[in-house]
Image (tube, grey):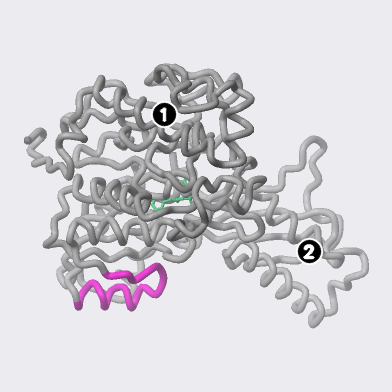
Amino acid sequence: MSAQGLQFQYWEPRVEKMPRAAIEELQLTRLRAAVDWALRTPFYRERLGKAGIKSGADIRGLSDLRRIPFTTKHDLRDGFPYGFLSIPRDDVLRLHASSGTTGAPTTIYLNAADIDRWSNFVARCIYGTGCTRADVFQNMITYGLFTGGHGFHAGAERVGMLVIPSGPGNTTRQFRLMQDFGTTVLHATPSFLLHVESKMKEEGIARESIQLKKAFAGAEPYSEDTRRRIEGLLHIDVYNSYGLSEMNGPGVAFECQAKAGLHLWEDGYIGEIIDPDTLEPLPDGETGELVLSCLCREASPILRYRTRDLSAFYTEPCVCGRTHRRLRRITGRTDDMLIISGVNVFPSQIEEVVMGMKEVGNNYLIILEKDGALDRLIVKLEVGPDIFMDDARPLNALREKIRRTLQAMITINPRVELVEPGTLPVSEGKAKRVQDNRPRDV
Ligand code: DLL
């Protein structure tokens, strides 16, 4: 099929172009099964029980979704480590955890069927952008507990691409890999892609020496302007990729070649947009908080998860012919979570570290800036009254101790600045502890 001169290709044409009524029927069947899986977890046994849901059969129609209480990140943390596990531990093959947290991370578990379905969703996303087994895929995103590396790795292998598991960082090595193996597709955060571009200039890498055609960019918010900038600078197509660990990771919603919103894979996820204050559902087209239910995971079923991400559903059909509704680019969040170079950080995590140190005074400030294309985190702290500012050695030791402890907690290396007591601004109302000076992206 072709529109706007594009040749669309489908990984699973029957599913991707399924009539709406059939999608909804499938969702209902899968929701009932998901409720049955959920009822095997301590958390949902209690929550769903209170809502009068004792079995999947109690869900009569999709409108009964609203009878299911919301699940929040707090709930997931409270349920750590096994409150959301629905199968015997011996049947679990892997776990992933939300980035940026070490204390009580939100953990999800996957069995063999879960990994298989997740990989298939990612393959569907990748293939839908026109990739084939002839492509060489350089996965410049973090592996480890983060879902981005492993999720894309598996999806790209399933498409049959040659996968280079480079992970992020070390641009010189990244360029070598691109040149040596003829990389055609990149995966990274949008800020790392911008960084790659400026390093390319700096290191004198000629564009003709690499064969890049496209990139998948996600894990953090970015604007249409940023996308165009990356596309223009690197001469590639950039596709927006949305996902979250609680819903497996990447592969939840993705742009097709029309690049006009992200198709939410509605055979795997049910999406709702709600008013974050009244918690009432909003009609298609209106902006609100995205709530997602996972229909494709047995080991950690999560229903009606409040993502805190702000988006809206586009109502008109997509030129690509896919029937799965499209989400508008995520424009922000309804909570205070910061995304620093793709890593999720709550200001409260930083507070926990700094306020736990007796040498630290009462006031601190979290500053976010751009260092070229990359994010920089600066934590500015007043020292306690017993610390002398003119004694450099203990001051340096303290700075280093705070830096190390923070890095261990949030995985990001901050710049720590110490100032005299009483010098940071004190606000009369609510303390304003975060100064996000990164250019507003949306
Ligand atoms: O960031 C999963 C992922 C990996 C997505 C690779 C895409 C590519 P978390 O670490 O749990 O998971 O962070 C999820 O990141 O709730 C959004 O706030 C934000 N986010 C993810 N993708 C986008 C995007 C992964 N394309 C949180 N645009 C989400 C805007 C995004 N925000």
Q: CA distance from mark 2 to mark 1?
A: 57 Å
Q: Write down the region rendered in magenta.
A: 164-180
Q: Which residue is mark 2?
A: 419
**Residue visible at 65% across and 63% down in the picture:** 409
**Residue visible at 59% across and 51% down in the picture:** 82
Q: Quadrant of residue 364?
A: bottom right
**Residue visible at 83% across and 63% down in the picture:** 360
Q: Is residue 244 above or below residue 408?
A: above
- Mark 1 and ligand 1: say if the CB distance to the nearest ligand atom is below 8 Å: no
Task: Check disc 1 and give the amino acid type.
Answer: Arg
Q: Position of residue 182 (x, y in %)?
A: 17, 71
Q: Identify the mark nearer the N-term, 2 or 1.
A: 1
Q: Which mark is residue 292?
A: none
Q: Which mark is residue 32?
A: 1
Q: Is residue 219 above or below residue 58?
A: below
- Quadrant holding the N terminus: top left
Is residue 178 rendered magenta in the image? yes
Q: How many marks?
A: 2
Q: Position of residue 52 (x, y in %)?
A: 58, 21
Q: Nearer the viewer, residue 206 or 85?
A: 85
Q: Position of residue 295 (x, y in %)?
A: 39, 37
Residue 194 in view: no
- Quadrant holding the C terminus: top left
Q: Is residue 103 above or below residue 7?
A: below
Is residue 143 rendered magenta in the image? no
Q: Nearer the viewer, residue 292 or 441?
A: 292
